[in-house]
Structures are given as structure tokens and as C-alpha cells.
Image (cartoon, grey):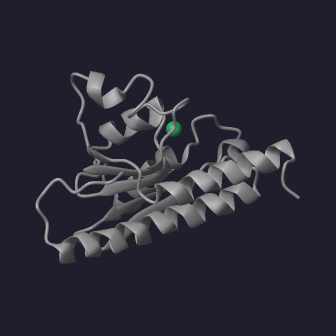
Amino acid sequence: MFFLTSAAKKYTLDYMDTFLRNVINTAIESAKKAAEYHEIPVGAVIFSAERQEIAAVCANRTEQDHDPTAHAEILAIRAACATLNQTRLTDYDIYVTLEPCPMCATAIAFARLRRLYFGAYDVKGGGVDHGCRVYQNAANIHVPEVYGGIAQTQCEELLTAFFKTLRGDNP
Ligand SMILES: [Zn+2]
């Protein structure tokens, strides 16, 4: 579940909810396109709330690029830094449809992203709330604010549908 920790007014909560959903929907659409190329459907958006500006939208490309590090988050960080011509993304937040793996969680820290919003939890491969819990164990890296479970059902369905198709359960 996603909780705002501050005692925000209802107006703010409603606004935030709509706002988060819009951005995560962009990540979901990107993930859906990746699935068409037989990529595990994970999408990431790097967004500045202050500037209302998307710096990058990327999905997994590991199969297409023959690159095991071509996860959505890594590609989005690279694209945003290249577009903005900067090495740190301090004013930006990353929205991902799935809990980042340890590699991506670490890259998010290196990029100094302000917040991480993610959709589905990844019990097996996640490195934020599961596995090595990068941000809890890292002594010397930047730690973003983390909000999990954004549009969780939608993000989970994306992956469930993909793996069902892989197994041939779907027409
Ligand atoms: Zn990853």
C-alpha cells in the first residue's frame, strides 16, 4: 500500500493519487510495448514533479539488446542523464512497474534520484523490500524515499499475463 506520511489534506491526497497513476500508467504502457518484443514487461519513467517534465521513459531491452544489464531503470537513468546533460538526477523521481532488482536499486542510489515509486513487489528478484534490501544495508550511498505498491494490481497483472503467455496458458 501507498501511504502519505504527512497529514495532507484530502485535496492533496486525491491530487497525488491521480498524479501518481498518470505517471505510473506511462510506465505501464511502456512495459506493455516491451512484452510485444518478448521482454519481461517492466517500464520506468523518470519525472520531475516540480517541472512537470518527463526526462525518460524506458522498458526492458535485455533480449533485444542482448544485454543482461538493459533493465528499464538502468536505461531510463542513462537516457535522462544524456538528455539533461547531467550526472545526477537530484530533482527527479523514478517510477517503475516492478520493485527494482539489487543492480537497479544501486543505480538509482548512484543517480541520486529523489524518490522511487514502484508498482508490483518482487519477492524473488527485488532488492528493495526483498533480498539484500539495498537501501537498508548500504552504509555509504544516497537512499531515495521509497513508495511501493503504486497501481500494484495493474502492475502485477502485466507480469502475470506475460508469464501465462510464455507458458502457453493463454490463447
Ligand atoms: Zn533491475
> Given the current orientation, which residue lies at the most extreme left position?
7
Q: Position of residue 161 (x, y in %)?
A: 71, 53
Q: Residue at x 36, y 66 (%)?
A: 20
Quadrant the C terminus occupies: bottom right
Q: Name the one closer to the observer, 78 or 167.
A: 167
Q: Position of residue 105 (x, y in %)?
A: 40, 36
In the image, residue 60 sits, relative to residue 137, either above or below, namely below
Q: Name the one closer to the observer, 118 or 74.
A: 118
Q: Position of residue 149 (x, y in %)?
A: 41, 51
In the image, residue 149 sits, relative to residue 140, either above or below, namely below
Total tally of numbered discs in the picture: 0
Q: Quadrant of residue 83?
A: bottom left
Q: Residue at x 67, y 63 (%)?
A: 33
Q: In this rendering, would 22 be left or right of 163?
A: left
Q: Residue at x 26, y 43 (%)?
A: 144
Q: Residue at x 67, y 56 (%)?
A: 34
In the image, residue 129 sits, relative to residue 154, either above or below, namely above
Q: Name the one closer to the observer, 75 or 135.
A: 135
Q: In this rendering, would 13 be left or right of 45?
A: left
Q: Position of residue 93 (x, y in %)?
A: 31, 56
In the image, residue 144 sits, relative to residue 54, either above or below, namely above
Q: In this rendering, would 81 be left or right of 145?
A: right
